[in-house]
Amino acid sequence: MLFLAASGILKPEMIPITYKFRSSMKTALLCYQDGAFTSVRNDEALVFSEAQLVMGFGAPELVSAPESYDFLKQQFPSANIVLCSSSGEIYDKEVRDGTITISASTFVSTTMATAMVTIDDFTSAYEAGKELIQLMPVTGLRLVLVLSDGGKVNGSELVKGMNAVKPDHVLITGGLAGDADRFEKTYVGLNGYPEPGKIVAIGFYGEKLVLSHGSLGGWDAFGLERIVTRSEQNIVYEIDHKNALDLYINYLGEYAAELPGSALLFPLSLTLEGCNETVVRTILSIDNVAKTMTFAGDLPEGSKVKFMRANFDKLIDAASDAAGSCLTIAQASPKLALLISCVGRKIILGNRIEEEVEAVADMFGAQTVLTGFYSYGEISPLQPFSNCEFHNQTMTITGLNEME
């Protein structure tokens, strides 16, 4: 198989790549609504009572309802059950609202450990991130999948805390729970009723576990590179010693009258300190009195930033390239692909939103089960198995499989 360089990403020339080994992992995909499963994909006849891991992503009102967890516990009595509210759920090639999309998986040799912390028990998300990783047994740890409250938790600080204590070569991926486009209250739960303020980690262990990941945005940068000259974590006051909001409004032109909604069309790229890699930062709100902008992640003083704008085709291509990154790493399609994409992408793409999911499905092929959700932030490394970073406006993919 040849690999071609495209936009800096190694991308397979021919797709999809099928398994190069026999897989011992089984995964079923289900959709829950109105007290029952309304759709089921169970190609391998997974026995529900034997499921070891169940992940559900869905509408906040459904995820937080006690009867939803009670139903799943009855269906999957032996499984670790993780629930996370979303801004839209991914079921195979579809993007749905008002449901819970559920993946149920079994493994032969892979084992798991779980942990949960509450953000209110810590002085900062940094400390919560450290504690979460330190609760994971170290020996044999390969992957930590993190699902966090999306309203109370500073994603940038959470990631910094996790990176500060994680063992070398351990992959950390995940995302922040969503609340449609309301930004009011999000829910996460582990083996119990989901609540606001929770952060859950699932640790995966085993030499036969096959992991892959990818995260790309597809935004166009424009204008000069500028310096953040005054900020406090995710609140920006000045860029290039000028009022940040005034500068931003000037760049938006005709779109300025539509703030804060139009801010989703014009995020900032942030160049990380000490390297040339960039992440995207979405504007959550503006304060016309204080003349400040609040972002979904930190923008430290001294950061280099550029304005960005949406390019619909490039957003969809980026989803395909994120899947290509997974194929490059694992040299095979995953059995289960967890897709975490930003609510901003869902709002921007509108009725084209399923195209980015279909682009991923086309890369992986029919043997891969797709699940996931639209989030308030994504967690993934920029380089294979390096430290994780906090992203906005990206399609982030985590691939899971197990060799027989």
Image (cartoon, rainbow, N blue to C red):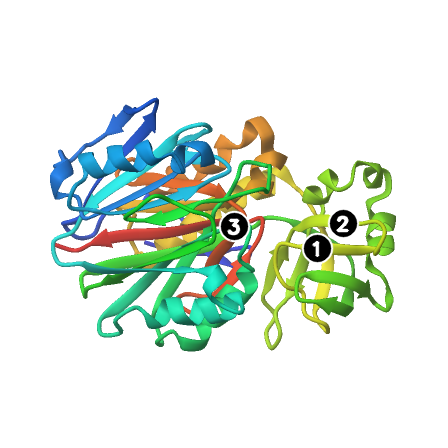
Viewer can see residue 367: yes
Q: CA distance from mark 1 to mark 3?
A: 15 Å
Asked if the residue at tag 2 contacts the one at tag 3, i.e. Cβ–Cβ closer than 8 Å, the answer is no
Asked if the residue at tag 3 contacts the one at tag 1, i.e. Cβ–Cβ closer than 8 Å, the answer is no
Q: Position of residue 267 (x, y in %)?
A: 69, 50
The quadrant in which the N terminus is found is: bottom left
> In terms of sequence position, does the residue under pointer 1 or pointer 2 come before the other?
2
The amino acid sitting under disc 1 is Thr
Asked if the residue at tag 2 contacts the one at tag 1, i.e. Cβ–Cβ closer than 8 Å, the answer is yes
- Reading the image, the residue beneath label 1 is 294
In the displayed structure image, the side of residue 171 where residue 352 appears, left or right: right
> In terms of sequence position, does the residue under pointer 3 or pointer 2 come before the other?
3
> In terms of sequence position, does the residue under pointer 1 or pointer 3 come before the other?
3
- Residue at (70% x, 70% y) in the render: 303
The amino acid sitting under disc 2 is Ile
The amino acid sitting under disc 3 is Gly
- Reading the image, the residue beneath label 2 is 286
Q: Which mark is residue 150?
A: 3
Taking depth in this image into account, of 202 and 41 the one nearest to the observer is: 202
Q: Quadrant of residue 89?
A: top left
Q: Position of residue 387 (x, y in %)?
A: 45, 70
Vertical position of residue 120 compared to residue 184: above or below: below
Q: Position of residue 123 (x, y in %)?
A: 53, 69
Q: Residues within 10 Å of mark 3 (few under 14, many from 20)?
A: many
Q: CA distance from mark 3 to mark 2?
A: 19 Å
Q: CA distance from mark 1 to mark 2?
A: 6 Å
State the SS at label 3: loop
- Residue at (37% x, 46% y) in the render: 338
Taking depth in this image into account, of 351 and 125 the one nearest to the observer is: 125
